[in-house]
Amino acid sequence: LPVDRAVAVRAVHTAIVLAVLEARFADERGTWFAAVRKSRAWLNRVAGSWGPALDAKAFENLVKDIVPLPKPMSAQGGL
């Protein structure tokens, strides 16, 4: 990737957090969706600089495939 290591690591961490929010807290999307707007914009900007080989959505999907995520709270019967 044409980016320094620190930015790449931060991008991975950001994508993991977004994936966890979407998978684990999908039922509570209204509480976190607006708050992650800045993170998504940054991830899109950073991943956009990587060129067509790996855009932001593909990067998020890659993280989702790699990181085993728990089922949403609703699928587990809630708390």
Image (spheres, helix red, strand yellow):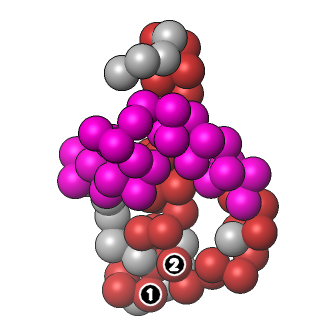
Residue range of the region highlighted in magenta in the rendering: 37-66
**Residue 63 visible in the current orientation:** no
Q: Which residue has dot 2 on it?
A: 26
Considering only vertical position in the picture, is 29 above or below 68? below
Residue 64 appears in which quarter of the rendering? bottom left
Q: Residue 29 vs residue 23: left or right?
A: right
Q: Nearer the viewer, residue 33 or 20?
A: 33
Label 2: how many Cα within 10 Å (few below 14, some 14–19, many 20+): some
User: Which circle's residue, 2 or 1, is located before the other in the chain?
Assistant: 2
The amino acid beneath tag 2 is Ala
Question: Considering the image in quadrants, where does the N terminus appear?
Answer: top left
Q: Residue 7 vs residue 60: left or right?
A: right
Q: Residue 73, image x and y in percent?
A: 45, 78
Measured in 3D between alpha carbons, the distance from the residue under mark 2 to the one under mark 1, in whole angstroms, is 9 Å
Q: Residue 12, image x and y in percent?
A: 44, 34
Q: Residue 45 vs residue 32: left or right?
A: left
**Residue at 63 percent of width and 80 percent of height:** 28
**Residues at marks 2 and 1 touching, judged by CB atoms closer than 8 Å:** yes
Q: Residue 59, image x and y in percent?
A: 36, 46
Considering only vertical position in the picture, is 40 above or below 4? below
- Secondary structure beneath label 2: helix
Q: Which residue has dot 1 on it?
A: 74
Q: Residue 2, image x and y in percent?
A: 42, 18
**Residue at 55 percent of width and 21 percent of height:** 7
